Image (tube, rainbow, N blue to C red):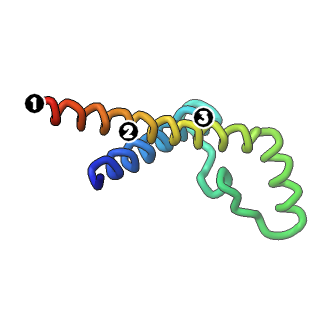
Amino acid sequence: MRSVLSVIIILGIAGLIVGYFIFARESPGHYIPLAILFGANPQGLGGFLHGIVDRTALNLPGIRQNIIISGIVGAAVGLVISFAGRGRSRRR
């Protein structure tokens, strides 16, 4: 059970990382910082309004959703791999 959980967690984290590199790209070689992506609020009214415009232009909720879905897919792949490997070891 411990190995199943560790494979799920490792591949889930790997899915999040891959999702970040796929979906958080602003331009070639530039990515949205994690602080902006996951909701660090700028201080002051001017920063607040600037943050709203930036988040709307970047479609941050959609990007966040795609990254989280990538993590879930990675965890699901980990679950399938761990159970597939477990079935093989029992057959031998």
The reply to whether discs 3 and 2 touch (Cβ–Cβ < 8 Å) is: no
Indicate which disc, 3 or 2, sits on the residue closer to the N terminus.
Answer: 3
Residue drawn at 45 percent across, 41 percent down: 75
Q: How far across and down, in percent of the image, does residue 63 sit?
A: 67, 39
Q: Which mark is residue 60?
A: none
Tell me the mark number nearer the camera, choosing from 3 and 1.
Answer: 1
The mark nearer the N terminus, 2 or 1, is 2
- Point out the frontmost of discs 3 and 2: 2
Q: Amino acid at mark 2?
A: Gly
> How many discs mark residues in the rendered view?
3
Numbered badge on residue 23: 3
**Taking 61 as reference, is 67 left or right?**
left
The first of marks 3 and 1 along the sequence is: 3
Q: Residue furthest front?
A: 91
Q: Which residue is mark 2?
A: 78
Residue at image mark 1: 92
Residue closest to the far left: 92
